[in-house]
Structure formats: structure tokens, C-alpha cells
Image (cartoon, rainbow, N blue to C red):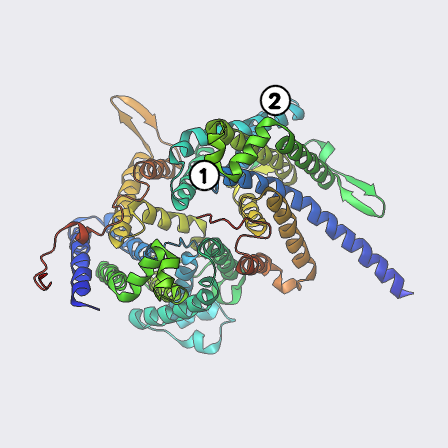
Amino acid sequence: MPGPMLAAIGFEEAGQQVINALSSGSTYALLALGLAMVFSIMGLVNFAHGELVTVAAYTIYLLNGVVPFGVQIAAGLAAGALVAVLMERVAFRRLRGASFVTMLFATLALSVIVQNLFLGLVSPRQRGVDIPAFFDGYVELGPFTVAALQLYTGVVCAIALVALTIFMRRSLLGLSMRAAAQDFQVARLMGIRANRVIASAFAISGLLAAIAAVFIVARRGTVEPAMGFTPVLKAFIASVIGGLGSLPGAVLGGFILAAVEVGLDATLPTGALEYRDAFALLIVIVILYFRPRGILGSKEEIV
Amino acid sequence: MTRRSLIRAGAGTTLLGVPLVLVALYGGLIAEPAGKRVVVSFLIALLLVVAIQTFSGNSGIVSFGHVAFMGVGAYAGALLTIPPATKASALPQLPQALLDVQLGLLPAVAVATIVTAVVAALVGLVLTRMEPYAMAMATIGVLVIFFVLFEAGKDVTRGTGGLYGIPSNVTLTVACVAAIATILVARLFRESSWGIKLRASRQDALAAEALGADVVRLRLGAWILSGALMGAGGALWAQYNLAFGPKQFFFTQTFDLLAMLVIGGMTTVSGAVAGAALITAATQLLRRLEGGFAIGGVEIAGMAGMTSILVAVLILVSLRARPEGLLGTRELDERIAIPTPWRRKRP
């Protein structure tokens, strides 16, 4: 009876692919959310966002074996948030209101600085990080076998997303951030402090990047100066798909990008797999062609 | 083209060309071989920056994808000039016609330019129909797509291994002539009615359209011209560097070239040239310091990556001080009063 058996394999494989997409999609979503938060409030695409991942990852690396892993993670999260606020204070504050291109270049320059600091002060080469056995192994989830790391990634990202939603909808600071994203000038007239709102947006984006960094390090088992590049590129693509500046759009875009990647992985013939990223970006261009502001983007002029 | 705009373009090219000829003379007559290399690389980088300026400066839309066209030109030019024997061993999968052909510098650059113009036209047909913001984002996609093609198209590009065996064709004279010619083309385009309409659309696309300008067509024309110049620049770049791989047509190259453009001032050709000169000078100066130096008796140890850090700091400081670029929004010749006897006196 080959029919039902094939169907069963098909079902399990499809389920496995969905799990893969959800797991990498949640990492993309966390990073895209950080980009979108900063963009919605000050109109800045932070290409140094990937360096926040690098900072958190190197904090874990430097404390590796010195303190328990939980403390390493806590320190990594703190470092991500702190460096994000520092970036804004040192590099971006003076550029507020400058053109889109000028601000974009400031963030690119900053990303070069941070990368080369790690290159010069630590090492240009990859360094190994000891990851606790806790992250290895597999969990049986009904008919599916899920890598423990994938499960943690999904669960933690879900918790972070829910917590962030509650924060943005219920707390005074969250409400003022949403107001500032709607209309920065009017929000200021209502007595919302610009510096505080912007610093909070950077702190949260740094924290989200650091959470993603924990899972990125756990998966790679290494750190290197340029490790933030690919994640931030994916996050950027995700937030463009969803609509730059839209928080739900960033999350949606993250999952769509992951679904497209996993779908292409599963369907492309072996010879064409090398071209996967080209296909993925072709789809992004098609989305931008028909929906220039992304799927959930606002109609307002951005540039 | 009116006489006035021809004179503007000529005056602008002369003002920028004379210092370039002086730099080239220094490179050819006085400098050591290493210094000469710097001058040639500078002239080629300048050509590429001016090529990007032709589109981004006049349309106001930043393109992150132009380095892809540099790559197309570089690969096309290299495949046409590598000796057949080298190609037979390195790229056995090439079509026979491409395996056998070996052109000189000029025909190779010409063919590479045409090929790149066609590729740029195909990409541009889609991209220029998009809104400016969406187009800028889509150019990042173009960069990544071509990078993937260069890396995965192993039969033609040798993938990450890269191409080698390119004959050394580009001399200081060739680089200098090419750079000045590119400046002239960029200035002629800027002053042409096409360029003026496009610049009007940069200021206000709706108003320009209301006055009858076909903005999509204007953008497409500038995009193809700019892509073709990029292809020519890429071909020359390859004939000077002699071996290269896909990584050289990705984000680092894009950042390096766009940084020059943004620092100098994107809206003018003079700005593009000034930015290229400033970043090259700063990089050369700082590279000498990378090994360590002393200030007032205090030894400062060198550090790998310090040049990149300091150049990036320079970019940050310069963006803060002059967000519109060092030269602002006016060409050098527009700052100097040029006598205009041909202008009719007002009644």
C-alpha cells in the first residue's frame, strides 16, 4: 500500500518543514522587530543592528567558562541593550532629521567600526563557544522530532513577542512609543520626551537582537566579527516585506521570508539550490513592485 | 544641447580634469611603483563613483545595486581578454566561441559596456517603475541576486575561486583618460535636457510629471547610462587587478564607493570626485599609521582594522558636519562666475 504511506511521509515531512520555518522565522522576526521599532520612531534603518547581535555574542564568548551560562546570557542581553543606547547617543542623536541616506550611511559606518574593533581586539578568525548540552538533543512532539534548540527558539521568541505586545499596549512608555511612531512632532507637543522614547526604542531593539544572538550563537557554536551581517540582511528583507516601520509587519515579514526559504529548499532541484537566495530576493522585489510599502506598510511617504 | 550647457559641462570637466592630470603626472613621473598603483586605483574608483552619481545624483534615488553592474562588466571584459589557453584549463565548460576569442583592451571594454547596458536595461525596466523608496530597497536585492549568480555560475565565473590570468592592459594614461571621459559624459548628461528634467523630478516628481516629464522614462535612461559606465569601469578595474572573485562585487565594495559619493556630495559630479579623492587620501595616510606611531613621545600600538575604523569615524564626523556632502549641492563651476557674453541683454 504505497499510497497512504507516501501521504504519511509527506505529512511528516511537511510538518518538519513548517517547524523549520517557524524556528528560523522567529529569529528573523525578533531582529526585524528591532529594526522596525527604531525606524517607526526616527525613520532610520539601522544597519548596525547586526553588530548588536555580534556584541551580545562576543559578551557570551568572553564570559564563556568564567561564569555560569545563565549569567553569560544575562550579560549578553544587557550588553546588547546598553550598546544600542550608546550607539544612538554617540552616533545618531546629532543626525536626527537628516536625510534618509545620510542616516543610513552613519549606521553603515558604525557597523564597520564595531566589526573592526572585534577584528582588531579579539581576532579576525572564528572563535569557538562552549554551548551547554542543554541545547543539544531532540524532543518528541507527537509525530515530529524537534531539535531542542528549535523548540527553545520558538518558545522564547513567542514569549518575547507577547511580552512586547503587552508592553507596547499597556505601559505608559509603550504607549508613548506608539504615539511617537504615529507622529513624532505631535507626540512631543503632547509632552512626550523625545530622547526618552528614542533611547527606549534602541534599548528594546538591542535587547531583541541580543535574544536572537543567544540562539544564533547556540546554533553556530562560534563567534566572528562579521557574524551580524547575514542576520541583519535577512531581518532587513523581512521588515521590507512586511512594511518598514510596521511592528506586526516585521513579524509577519520574518515568517514569510522563512517560509519562502524553507519552501524553496524543499522544492528547488539540487542543481538550483545554490541560487536559493537569488530566488528569495526575486520574490521580495516582486512584492515591492506590487506593494511598495510592504504588506502591512503605511501609505505615508518615508523618504 | 544648448551652447550654454555645453560650456558648463566643458568648464566643469576642465576644472576637475586638470587636477586629475596633475595627479596622474605625479603618479607617472615622481611616485614610486606603490604610489603609482594608488593613483591608478584612485582614478578607477573615481570613475566608478561618477558612474553611480550619474543615476543617483540626478534622480535622487540611492542605488545599492550598481556594484552588480561593475561585476557584469568585469566578468565580461575578463572573459574576452584572458588567453584561450588559460580559459581552456580554467573554464572548460565555456562555449567554444567564448573559449577561442581574445580581444584587445578597447574592443573588450566596448563589448563589456554594451553587455552591461543590456543587463542594466532589463533590470531597470522593472526597477524604474517602482516608487523611489521601494526602488532603493529593491537595488539591495539586485546586489544580492547578482552576487549569488556570480558565485553559483561556476561554468562562467569559476565561482568563489574567481577568474585569473587577465592580461595587464590598464596603464596610468588609460585610467586617467577613462576617468576624465567619464566625468565629461556625466557632466554632459547632467546639463542635457534629459538630465535637467531628471533633476527637476528629484526635487519634486509630481510637479515634474505635471509639466510633462515622463519620470519613469527619464529614470530608465539615466539608469542604463549609469549602468553602462559602471560596466566600462568594471572592465577596466578587472584589467588592472588581473584576478578577482564574486566577493569583490558585494557590500564592502558598495559601501566603499557609496561612502565616497555621500561624503563628497551626491548631487554633483564635483562632489563625487572630491569624495573619491578625500577617502583615498585618508585611507593612504591612515594605512601608514596602522603599524603603530608616536604622538608627543607616546607610543600608540598599531591594530589590525584601524584604517577601516578611522575612515568610518571620518565618515561619521563628515556626515554630522555636512549632511549634504562636502561640496553641497552646487558644481565647482557653478560657484565660479563664468563670463557669459552670449547671453542676450534684457531689454
Q: Residue at x 30, y 56 (%)?
A: B50
Q: Establish whether labels 1 and 2 are both on one chain.
A: yes
Nearer to me, A184 or B122:
A184
Q: Which residue extends farthest front?
A: B347
Residue A164: give x, y in percent of width and height. Answer: 64, 33
Q: Nearer the viewer, residue A219 or A187?
A: A187
Q: Does residue A11 show up?
A: yes
Q: Residues within 10 Å of mark 1 (few under 14, many from 20)?
A: many
Percent of width and height locating residue B93:
52, 71
In the image, residue B120 sits, relative to residue A197, either above or below, namely: below
Distance of label 1 from label 2 (alpha carbons): 28 Å
When asked about the image quadrant of residue A176, the answer is top right
Q: Amino acid at mark 1?
A: Ser
Relative to residue B115, is residue A64 drawn left or right? right
In this view, the residue in front, A224 or A299, is A299
**Where does label 2 land, which residue?**
A66
Q: Nearer the viewer, residue B231 or B187?
A: B187
What is the chain identity of the residue bearing mark 1? A
The quadrant of the rendering that contains the N terminus of chain A is: bottom right
The answer, for residue A38, to whether it is visible in the render is no
Residue B279 place in picture, x, y as percent: 30, 44
Estimate the x, y position of residue A13 in percent, counting from the top left.
78, 55
**Which residue is pictured at 37% across the width and 69% down the height?**
B112
| Residue at the outermost bottom position | B97
* Three-letter amino acid code at the position of disc 2: Val
Residue in the image at 44% along x and 39% along y: A107
Q: First in sequence, mark 1 or 2: give its number.
A: 2
Residue marked by disc 1: A111
Residue B271 image label: none
